[in-house]
Amino acid sequence: MKKRVLLMSAILLSIVGFAQTDIATARAQGLGSSVTITGVVTNGSELGPIRYIEDNTGGMALYSSSLSGLQRGDEVTVSGSLKDYNGLLEMDPISSNTVNSTGNTLTPQVYTPLQIGEATESQLVQINNVIFNSGGSLFTVGTHDFTANGESGKIYIKTGHSLENTLIPMGTVTLIGISSQHTYNFGCPHTSGICPASDGHQILPRDTADIIQSGNIVFTSAVNQTNITTTSYDLSWSVSANSSTNCNYGTTTALGTSINSGGNTQNHSISLTGLSPATFYYVQCYSIDGLDTAFSNVGIYSTASLSSGKIRPYFNHSVDNSFSNGVDAQDIGSGFADTISAYIALAQNTLDICVYNASSSIIATAINAAYNNGVAVRYIADDDVTNIMLSSLNANIPVVYRDPAPAGIMHNKFIIVDANSTNNSWILGGSTNWTNPSNLLNDYNNMIFIQDEAIAKAYTLEFEEMWSGVFGDNKLDNTPHKFMADGKLVEVYFSPSDQTTSQILRTIEGVDNTLEFGLLSFTRDDLGQAIIDKDIEFGVTARGIIEMKNSSNGGEYDNLVAASVNVRSHEGVAHQLHHKYLITDASATSSDPIVLTGSHNWSNNAENNSDENTLIIHDATIANIYLQEFEKRWGELGTPNAIDDLIDIELTVFPNPSAGIVNIKSDLKVEQINLYAIDGKFISATDESTINIDTKGVYFLKIITDKGNLVKKIVVE
């Protein structure tokens, strides 16, 4: 018998015509059965409209808006029908509910990750000695993997959860939450209608108090890598108490070399020197305060390579070189297949290909030629698409397919040429599938080549993991993320293991002046809200193009339009906008211009299920090159009567520069004017047409009108 602070009675009652039973007996009934149960509520509104209850025999999920007033500790008697929702057995609809008492408590039962399943479903559970795989990253909406004593499990964070965008703990924690399930494994051959799926089990922490860190000293920041050279780099972190600075490192997870810098501080920095170029080192940082020690996760970090670091973006549709800052973007039109083939022809030793879908005979010929020239060729593809090109490959070229389980697809579009070569290592990234004519020729796409040995080795680590049959949410965050290519910081993230959405979010939150994006699919509320916040609260000029304006998963287009963000739909235009890129501060070299591109759509599926890759490139030239592509697409969607053009015509801000008095003249109805500092800090709001600014500097005005919003930069001298 499971120990409970409160034990439920098994008295049989008759409520609204149904005989009351314990929860375990109710769970054994067939789907569609009407049951009445009594239990203690273990969560409130923090998990949305769903409520979980349990008695001393088991737990049950309840789904109904009529339960919104229920709080933790309420004892409730409910009647309703059994239903399966993506593997979770729940009562829906609820025909009646009665609160019997309040303030009851339940002690969570202690389990190991392997015990979490159908037997624990909907119960409040506790797992000890938990270590999160991505400790030091941020909790984002979706699943996060952990281990406990060698067993694996996962938690799920919903939108608006108090843990969202907080630091994932490093070191051992105690995890409390509700045992739940969400699976795409549909279908049930059982006559009872109950067919428990064997996957999708997850823990739902209710709030920050459900993750309990151990010890008197804990990490309060991630470990950050900076000053990357071919033979050294620095690592920095912070902890909750004054302590010493230490690390263990090595070229394997066994580590082996120690650095003990001593000291007594909360903010730590340590230098690893005497390293080899383009080499990966495993590092565990730690700080000691008396008898307490805080350990980081074992991270993997790379030195810079001796490669050229050349970065070459290409586009398959026209660009607007009038926006060029000196290096023109290249529209190579129908030359995508030939260009890919030319880089394949560079391979002298190895060629690894990881592409979702392919049908190009030109590329097939290039792959076969490489194989016939003695290059070791490997190919990973997805099995959900036709991939008709593969039938044209030499039968001796090995191909690995991602099968339907787990959920998601192998959505990458990358190649790796001679990964272990200093001067001939190349990777291909970007948005382009190898389908002809759709992605290679017709749809709007980008591809980007980088010559860098260290980056190529990181892509190879990811390739090897999938080559071994590990895909989707079974993968680990096991590659370095920061690289220096010809003096440019390049970040690399793979989905779903590397918390890519948190990196997109971080990039958006770092914008100072301008933000542009071109996306096939945009359904992540957290990313949408981040753009809205930047546009409204911080004076950033945000513009975006979205292909799939509406989505069954909830597109962000309408949310952005409702918030007056300047976004345009690409729907209805011949051929899809297939890009997945973000540009920040392209014209402000002092503000770290960035391009983010790859295969990762801004969706839950990309974040949580599918195999994806993302590049974040910190470079003004590359940002300007992508801006030339964006401006061409933006101009094609605009007309002389577009809202932003009308606002510019009908609204004037003068003088600019000014001596401190700024006037707004407009035939439009100006509803409000917000004043922001150059760093985005809100200063004031007014509905007057004249603004007085006392301090010299650069400011932003966000002018809200009845036809839309306009951001103007002003200078006070």
Image (cartoon, grey):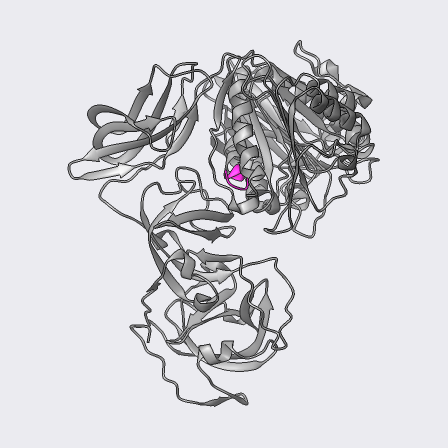
Residue 652, picture quadrant: top right
Q: Depth check: 159 or 171 in front?
A: 171
Q: In this view, does 511 lie above or below 158?
A: above
| Viewer can see residue 247 | yes
Q: Depth check: 338 or 694 in front?
A: 338
The range drawn in magenta is 495-501
Task: Identify the residue shown where x is 26% and y is 28%.
Answer: 246
Residue lying furthest left: 290
Is 324 colored magenta in this rendering?
no
Q: Is residue 101 above or below residue 173?
A: below
Q: In this view, does 183 lie above or below 241?
A: below
Task: Please provide percent x and percent y for residue 545.
Answer: 70, 34
Task: Identify the residue shown where x is 61% and y is 57%.
Answer: 184
Task: Identify the residue shown where x is 62% and y is 42%.
Answer: 563
Task: Please provide percent x and percent y for residue 715.
Answer: 54, 17
Residue lying furthest top: 326
